[in-house]
Amino acid sequence: MFKKLLAVLIGLVLGYWLIDDFNPESVKGKRVLVTGASTGIGEQIAYHYAKLGANVVITARREKRLQEVVAKCREYGSGNQVFGYVPADMLQLNNTEHVIKEAVELLGGLDIIVLNHIILLDLGVWTGSQHNVSLVDKVTKVNYQSYVYLASYALPHLEKSKGSIIVVSSLAGKLGQPFVSIYSGSKFALDGFFGGLRQELLLRNCDISVTTCVLGLIGTDNAIGQLRDFGQTFLLAFVKAESPSDTALAIIKAGARRVRQMYYPLIPVYPMTLFRDWFPETCEYFNRIVYTLNS
Ligand code: NDP
């Protein structure tokens, strides 16, 4: 009896995670803002939305790259889709209101915001140096505060459209990671704020979904370059980096299905987050095993 119950339970859980009930039509015509879309996962998210028939505005700092990404979106999309860009540095928090205003103007409203940008950091040991301390303000502003500001300015528009907030986060936001402690901290902060916001929205019957995406290693040029520069050859050989394009599509699907949290790749990311509180030392041990300290 117990075995049958367990089998049904496992079947239900696997079914929930693995059945792909994504309807591409649900994204067609949507008005989407993607941040950090000049490269990496954000760039791929923009291309997938373009292929799926959405209207897309992208933002990041490098205008030339944004123009190139928009040109490619136009190739992937059709003539009646809107594509645009807003160059902005998220270190300057007053740019966040401008980004939302511009996106709303270009798109005629807002259905989905994908918060994805991060400040590029070298991996390193946190010794409490002056350099370490100088990063705190920058990382907090770009990786955390700007997300809260952008979501806040977008809320009235998303409330009107019964829209979605998609927050791109990391396993590092669930389980502290060595050599990126300050990045880990900023991702934990996102989990706290958006977890609270999600529940407030439900409590006040406001039909805006909040999807947090918990990602493992994804093979973007920046992520792989940072690991290589810090001599993490064992990790790079041991852990499979997922494709940025597949990851981008998984993020879009999770947002369209309005799930509260997605894990990519499901294994090992989901079990790591599950076991984190039950077996913290074992989890941290397995986590540490793939890192090497060369410096
Ligand atoms: P990338 O480093 O490839 O891209 C980061 C993007 O952010 C770029 O478009 C960059 O553009 C933009 N950006 C950087 N600084 C600023 C700034 N000050 N203001 C505005 N935009 C800025 O990142 P990934 O694609 O690798 O990661 C995307 C998301 O996925 C992040 O949230 C990350 O935490 C998450 N993630 C990634 C993993 C991975 O292994 N790749 C693992 C787990 C999570 P520009 O320089 O033009 O401003």
Image: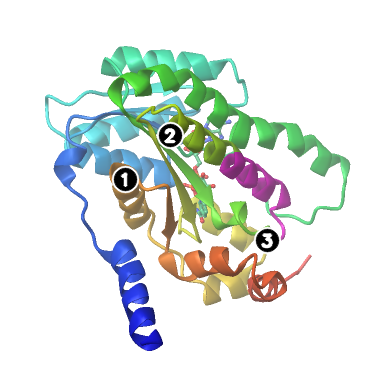
Residue 207 relative to residue 217: left or right: left
**Which element is circle 2 on?**
helix
Asked if the stretch drawn in magenta spans residue 251, the answer is: no
Task: Return the disc, 3 or 2, that comes first in the chain's sequence.
Answer: 2
**On the image, numbered disc 2 is attached to which residue?**
202
Tell me the distance, in whole angstroms, between the alpha carbons under discs 2 and 1: 22 Å
Image marks 2 and 1: residues in contact by CB distance under 8 Å: no
**On the image, numbered disc 3 is attached to which residue?**
230
Based on the displayed image, in which of its 4 quarters is residue 267 positioned?
bottom left
Looking at this view, name the residue that lies furthest to the front.
Answer: 1
Span shown in magenta: 178-192
Question: Where does residue 37 sit, x and y in percent of width and height?
Answer: 41, 36
Tell me the distance, in whole angstroms, between the alpha carbons under discs 1 and 3: 31 Å
Image marks 3 and 2: residues in contact by CB distance under 8 Å: no
Examine the rendering and report whether any part of residue 89 can be seen. Answer: no
Question: Where does residue 190 sit, x and y in percent of width and height?
Answer: 58, 40
- Label 1 crowd (10 A; few <14 / some 14-19 / many >=20): many
Mark in front: 1 vs 3: 1
**Which element is circle 1 on?**
helix
Tell me the distance, in whole angstroms, between the alpha carbons under discs 3 and 2: 43 Å
Please state which amino acid type lies under the numbered disc 2. Leu
Quadrant assignment for the C terminus? bottom right
Please state which amino acid type lies under the numbered disc 1. Ile
Residue 269 relative to residue 52: left or right: right
| Residue at 48% from the left image edge and 26% from the top image edge | 151
**On the image, numbered disc 1 is attached to which residue?**
252
Image marks 1 and 3: residues in contact by CB distance under 8 Å: no
Q: Nearer the viewer, residue 278 or 246?
A: 278
Question: Where does residue 103 sit, x and y in percent of width and height?
Answer: 36, 19
Examine the rendering and report whether any part of residue 152 can be seen. Answer: yes
